[in-house]
Image (tube, rainbow, N blue to C red):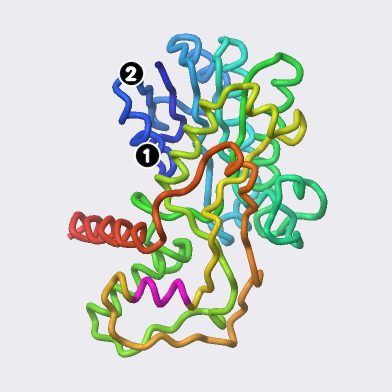
Amino acid sequence: MKIYIAGHKGMVGSAIGRQLKADPENRIIQRTHAELDLTNQAAVQDFIEQEKPEQIYLSAAKVGGIHANNTYPADFIYQNVMIEANINHAAYRNSVKKLLFLGSSCIYPKHVNQPMREDALLTDTLEPTNEPYAVAKIAGIKLCESYNRQYETDYRSVMPTNLYGPGDNYHPENGHVIPALIRRFHEAKEQCQPTVMIWGSGTPYREFLYVDDLASACVHVMNLDQEDYQQHTQPMLSHINVGGGEELTIRQLADTIARVTNYKGTIAFDNKKPDGTPRKLMDSSRLNNLGWQPTISLEEGLIIAYNDFLKKQLAEK
């Protein structure tokens, strides 16, 4: 099968590539940003017309932290909406059989009941710091749904929880919580620091998913029979949450990362720093009912992620 992965160099796109390449029947098409600008409608149309993939995994996106989202909100909404619109429309015009769009848990309202269910979408206001990005991701879901309703396409969406794994950004300030903590504990061990200070009280609950588990969920959802998919979704509420199903406190996470990195010092918490949301958990029962479960435990995944970090450290030297 001929499959195009948009965003194949990112952490998620790379994992989807690993999953798909395990099947020798699959022929993967990839283009770098230099080779194909996904915000250029004519270029995307020409590419899809020429290659004619049977499936498209849409994991390409402009992403960034709170500072980047606040500084460049126009870039975040424009680039992401253009990528989604161009690929959806070119897929429809060239009779691409299936498309899978990857969103984000930030699509849900700021004050939402936990665990977050799919039907919480558009029920309240979004977190202001990344609202343009979240609106763009919601538009991606609605593009898939609208093309399905008008043109009878088969375009689907998944919304992953917090991800980690090979290919992550291990920057101590700009990285997400797991890669940033991996780096901080590793450096504390190397420098024989007696204490690692963690921002906040350590009490908030979070959920994490190893990126190759997400990739297996994406392939599972993409390849579901249309009848099965439609039975568990609605035409205007068709996205599917992808979570690990288990939550732990930031304190428990820090203890686990300290064990994985073999850090022997103490862990302290700076209670003067804000904690953020006390609990953030996806309700993944819709996906579980469709026959998917994660297979990689947090500790297993953290060991692989730490080895990935060490490889990157060696490569940089």
Drawn side of residue 5 relative to residue 121, left or right: left
Tell me where residue 184 appears, x and y as whole percent. 35, 73
Q: Residue at x 18, y 59 (%)?
A: 314
Tell me where residue 239 appears, x and y as whole percent. 66, 37
Q: Nearer the viewer, residue 197 or 231?
A: 231
Q: Earlier in the sequence, mark 1 or mark 2?
A: 1
Density class for disc 2 (Cα within 10 Å; few <14, some 14-19, many ≥20) is: few
- Label of residue 14 in the image: 1
Q: Nearer the viewer, mark 1 or mark 2?
A: 2
At mark 1, the secondary structure is helix
Q: Quadrant of residue 194?
A: bottom left
Q: Quadrant of residue 203?
A: bottom right
Of the 4 image quadrants, the one containing the C terminus is bottom left
Is residue 148 depicted above or below 68 in this figure?
above
The residue type indicated by label 1 comes to: Ser
Drawn side of residue 265 relative to residue 294, left or right: left
Q: Which residues are magenta?
A: 252-258
Density class for disc 1 (Cα within 10 Å; few <14, some 14-19, many ≥20) is: many
At mark 2, the secondary structure is loop
Tell me where residue 127 appears, x and y as whole percent. 71, 59
Q: Magenta span has 285?
A: no
> Quick check: marks 1 and 2 in contact, CB under 8 Å?
no
Q: How many marks?
A: 2
Q: Residue at x 69, y 27 (%)?
A: 230
Drawn side of residue 272 relative to residue 3, left or right: right
